[in-house]
Amino acid sequence: MNEVSAERRGRGRSGGGAARRAERTAVTIETARFIERNIPNFEILNDEALEIIEYNAETVLEEIGVNFVDNPAALQRWRDVGADVTGERVRIPRGLARQLCATAPSSFTQHARNPARNVEIGGRNLVLAPVYGPPFVRDIEGGRRYATIEDFRNFVKLGTMSKWLHHSGGTVCEPTDIAVNKRHLDMLLAHMTLSDKPYMGSVTEPVRAEDSVRMSKILFGDEFVEQNTVMTSLININSPLTFDSVMMGALEVYARHNQAAIVSPFIVGGAMAPVTVAGTLTQVLAEVLAGVAYSQMIRPGAPVIFGAFVTSIDMNSGAPTFGTPEAAHITYGAGQLARRMGLPYRSGGAFCGSKLPDAQAAYETANSLNMALLAGVNFMLHAAGWLEGGLVSSYEKFVLDADQLGALHHLAKGISMDENGQALDAIREVGPGGHYLGCAHTQANFKTAFWRTNVLDYKPFETWEEEGARDSATLASIKVKKMLRDFEAPPLDPGIAEALKAYVDQRKASEPDAFG
Amino acid sequence: MNEVSAERRGRGRSGGGAARRAERTAVTIETARFIERNIPNFEILNDEALEIIEYNAETVLEEIGVNFVDNPAALQRWRDVGADVTGERVRIPRGLARQLCATAPSSFTQHARNPARNVEIGGRNLVLAPVYGPPFVRDIEGGRRYATIEDFRNFVKLGTMSKWLHHSGGTVCEPTDIAVNKRHLDMLLAHMTLSDKPYMGSVTEPVRAEDSVRMSKILFGDEFVEQNTVMTSLININSPLTFDSVMMGALEVYARHNQAAIVSPFIVGGAMAPVTVAGTLTQVLAEVLAGVAYSQMIRPGAPVIFGAFVTSIDMNSGAPTFGTPEAAHITYGAGQLARRMGLPYRSGGAFCGSKLPDAQAAYETANSLNMALLAGVNFMLHAAGWLEGGLVSSYEKFVLDADQLGALHHLAKGISMDENGQALDAIREVGPGGHYLGCAHTQANFKTAFWRTNVLDYKPFETWEEEGARDSATLASIKVKKMLRDFEAPPLDPGIAEALKAYVDQRKASEPDAFG
C-alpha cells in the first residue's frame, strides 16, 4: 500500500511472562503518508462572489487598514514598501499586499527527523496534526483536570502511535506544572524524542521561537535547518485586523530562518468578525493578505500558510460553537480564496463544544472533519483530541478522532475506474440472485476495499452485550491504555538526545521560574 | 422566515395548576419548508467515468439481465416491449430501459393533508423523512426491546413535533404486537391522524398497497388521489439484479394509481454488490434502469425515484457498516447518475452501526448526513432515529438527528452575497481591535445569522457540571419526554377520522390474525 510511507515493528518493554511477550511482539507502529487528494474540492462560491470578496478585502486594507501594535520596526517596514502609516494603523494601497504575497511558495516540504515522515504542505495534499493549546485534559477515570507535562508526553506518544496523524503538532496540551517561561523547552524535547514526525515551534515569545530554532539545529544540524523547513508554527492574528508584537516577533524569527508560519485569523463569527459569512471572508482575506505580506517583507520566499480558525458564537449564551453550517461556509470559501492566492491552506479540525466525548462531540467533529477535507485544507491542526471548545485535550476523543481520520484518507482516494474497479466480471460471475462474498473479485480485493475502524464497535449485538454493552468512549479508553503500554520511542542518536537534554537544562537554569 | 412554511401554536392537554398551564401555552409546532439547495452538488466522477458506468450498466442489462421472480405478467410485459425473456431472466437490449425511463417525471409534488406540508421531490430539493423498518426500539430507561404500536405512535408524534422533518415516513418502527397482516392499517391510521405531513404506503403485500390507496382516498377524497400523488413508497430491489413479486406487486398498485415509488437497490457492498465502488454503481444503475422502466410500463408518467440504499460490510465480522468512505463514494456517484437520468434521487440517512446513541453513532451519522446533502439527494429516508444498522429506532437519537437536520437546512442556504452579507459597513464600524457583538450589523442579523441547536449543550462548564454533567443522550431523553408531553394532534375533520377508524376495524375483522 503506497499510503503507508514507513513501518516500524517494535517489541514492548522487556520483562513479564511468555504470554505477555507474545502479545507484545505483535505491536506495529505505522504512519500513513499524508493525504494526496484524488477528489475535487467543494467550490461553494462562484467567481463573481470571490471577486467581490477580494475587492472588498482590498478596500478594507486601503480604507480601514490594520494595526501593528507595539512594533515600530514593523511600521517602518510597512512605510518602506509604500503603505500609509498613521500611529499604529497601517493602510495598504490596493494591490500592494497581494503583490508582496507573490513570493510565498505555493507548497513546501516540512522535514521530519525521520525522512519517511516528511510532509508536503500545499497542492492537493492534506497533513493532519493533533489538538493544540488546551489547558485541561480529560479522561474517563480522572475527569477534567489541569494538564501536566506527563499528560503532554502521553499525547505526544498517542500521536506517534496514531497511523493517520502525519504530524506531532505543538502544544498538544499546556503543561501547567512547568513554569510558563520554560515549558516550551520540555514540550519541544518531548516532540523531538518521543516522536519522529514533524512538529511545531513555540510562538509565545520571540525568544522561545529562537529556542525552537536552536533545539531544531541540535536535532537536524545547523546547516540543515538554515536550508530546510523543519517547523510549521502557529501565528494567530488578533482579529479584527490586529497584529500583536508577540506573535509578529515569533513570525519574524521563523521567517528569518526560513521556517514555516501559519498566518491565522482567529475568527469567532459575531464577535471577532462580522456575523455574516461573506463579511467574515472579507476580513479573513484582508488579515491574511497583510500577515503574509509582512512575512515576505522579512524574508521573501519564507513558507507561509493561509490560516482560518473559524467558530461561530451562540448568541444566547455567548459560547463559541463548532461543527456549525456557518463555519462550514467560511471554511469552504476561505479555501477558494487561499487557492486563488496560490497559498497552502490551514483550517478545520476535530472541533466540538461538547464537554464529553459523546454524540454531540462526534456530530460536531464529523461535520468539521468532512467539511475540511472537501474544503481543500492542506494543513489541519486540531485533527484529534479537541474537546470543550479547545479547553480540554481528551484522551478518549484523541483516539476516536484519529480513527475517523482514516476514513478521510479513504474518501480522498476517490473512485478507481480501472478494470478491477469496474468489476464487470464479478457481476457476470455472481449474476441475479447470487452473492458476492465468495466470488473471486471479492476475495482479491476485500483486504483493501473498505476502510475499517480500529476502535469502534462492529460486533454482533449479543457479543457486544455480553462484553458489557460498552459505549465508544469506554472502548476508546481501553485503546488509549493499550497504545501507551505499547509505545516505544523511535530510535534517536544518543549524542543528540544528550545534547537536547543539556540545552534544556542549561536554559532552565539560566532564569528563574515565571508563572503567568 | 420563508423556510417555515406553516406554524401552529397549540396548548397542552387541559388540567393541572396555573403554573403548568402557563408553561404549556408556550408550545409551538413548526415545520420547516423542504430544503431548496442554494449550494452546488459534489461531483466526484468526471463525465468519462460516468459514461463508462452507463455503458457497463447497459452491458449488464443486455448480457446478464435481471430476474423477475414469480411474476409471469411482468415477464409478458417485458416481452411486449422487446426484451429477451428466458425463464425468469429478462435481458434488455442496450438503450431500451433508458428509453422507457424517459416518461418518468424529473420532479413531482407529494401532497399532504395539510397543503402547507406538501413537498416537491426532485430538482435541487431535499425532503427529510424519519427512520423506516426497525423491529426494535431503544431508550435510556427501557433499553432495547421489541417495538409496539405504542412506540410507533410515539415516533409519529416525534416526527410531527420535529421542525426539520418534512415527511412523516412509513414504518418508523415495526409494531410487533399487531398481527403482520393488520399492522399496516394501524400504521397508516397513525400517520393520517397524528401527523399532517406526507407519508408512505405499505409495500409488504400488494393487497396492503391497495389498503393504503383506499385509506388515502378516505383522507383526501377519491378523485384527489387519482389525480395527485399522496404517497411515496419504498420498493426495494432484491440485489443483485432480482425483482421479487411482492415488491413488484406493490409497485404495480402504486404506479397504476399514479402514486410514487422509490426504486431502490439494497446494496451491502461485497455481499449484494461488487466490493468496488465503480462496480457497485454499475449494478445500481442497471437495477434502477430495469425497475424504473418497469414502472413506466405499468403507467407512463408514474412518479418514481432513483434509490440507492448503501452500506459496506466489515470483512472481519460480516457486519454492515455505516458512515464509511465507500458509502460516501457510492452515494456521490449515484447522485450524478440519477441527475443524468433526470430522476429524483433517494439515498443517505442518519446511518450508524452503533448500538447506542454515542460518539460512534454520531460520527457515522454525521458522515452520512453531510455526504447525502452534498450528493444532491432529493428524498432522504432514515434521516432521524436510525440505530444499530437499522435494527433499532432510538428515541434519543431521533431527537439528536432531527436537530442536526437543522444544520443541513442552513448549510444548503449557501452564502448571501448581498450588501448585508458583505458587511463592509460593519467592518468599517468596528475597525481594528474592536468587537462585533454590539455593532449595528450584528444586532440586525444575530437572530437569523447562525443555526442553533435545540438539544445539544452550549452552557458554561460550571453550569453544565452543576446540572449533573449530562451527556447528549441524557439531554435528548429529556427532550423526548417534553415533546411527547407537548404533542397535540393536528386538527382533522371528525367525519374523516371516523371513516378511517371504521375502515381499519372492518378490514381487521375480515380476516384472522397472522403472525409472520
Image (tube, coloured by chain):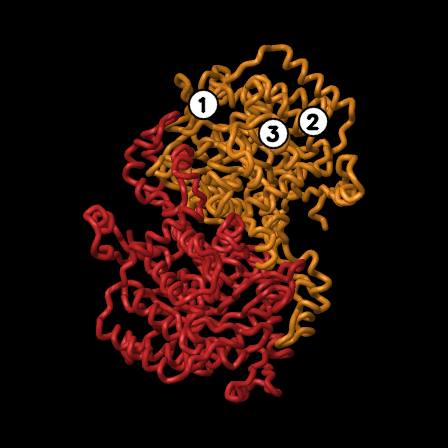
Chain colours: A orange, B red
Examine the rendered structure and indicate whether residue A435 appears above or below residue B47: below
Residue B195: percent from left, percent from top: 31, 64
Query: Helix or strand or loop: what does disc 2 sit on?
Result: helix
Amino acid type, mark 1: Ala
Query: Which badge, 3 or 2, comes first in the chain's sequence?
Result: 3
Query: Which badge, 2 or 1, comes first in the chain's sequence?
Result: 1
How many residues crowd mark 2 within 10 Å: few (<14), some (14–19), many (20+)?
Answer: few
Residue A436: percent from left, percent from top: 66, 69
Foreground residue among A494 and A308: A494
Q: Residue at x 57, y 45 (%)?
A: A474
Amino acid type, mark 3: Phe
Protein chain holding label 2: A
Query: Which badge, 1 or 3, comes first in the chain's sequence?
Result: 1
Count numbered badges in the picture. 3
Q: CA distance from mark 3 to mark 2?
A: 30 Å
Query: Helix or strand or loop: what does disc 3 sit on?
Result: helix
Disc number at residue A227?
A: 2
Q: CA distance from mark 1 to mark 3?
A: 43 Å
The residue where tag 3 is placed is A152
How many residues crowd mark 1 within 10 Å: few (<14), some (14–19), many (20+)?
Answer: many
Residue A197: percent from left, percent from top: 68, 34
Q: CA distance from mark 2 to mark 1?
A: 31 Å
Q: Are marks 1 and 3 on the same chain?
A: yes
> Could you tell me if the residues under marks 1 and 3 are in contact, i.e. CB atoms within 8 Å?
no
Q: In this rendering, does residue B484 appear at all?
A: yes
Query: Helix or strand or loop: what does disc 1 sit on?
Result: loop
Quadrant of the image occupied by residue B397: bottom left
Foreground residue among B128 and A293: B128
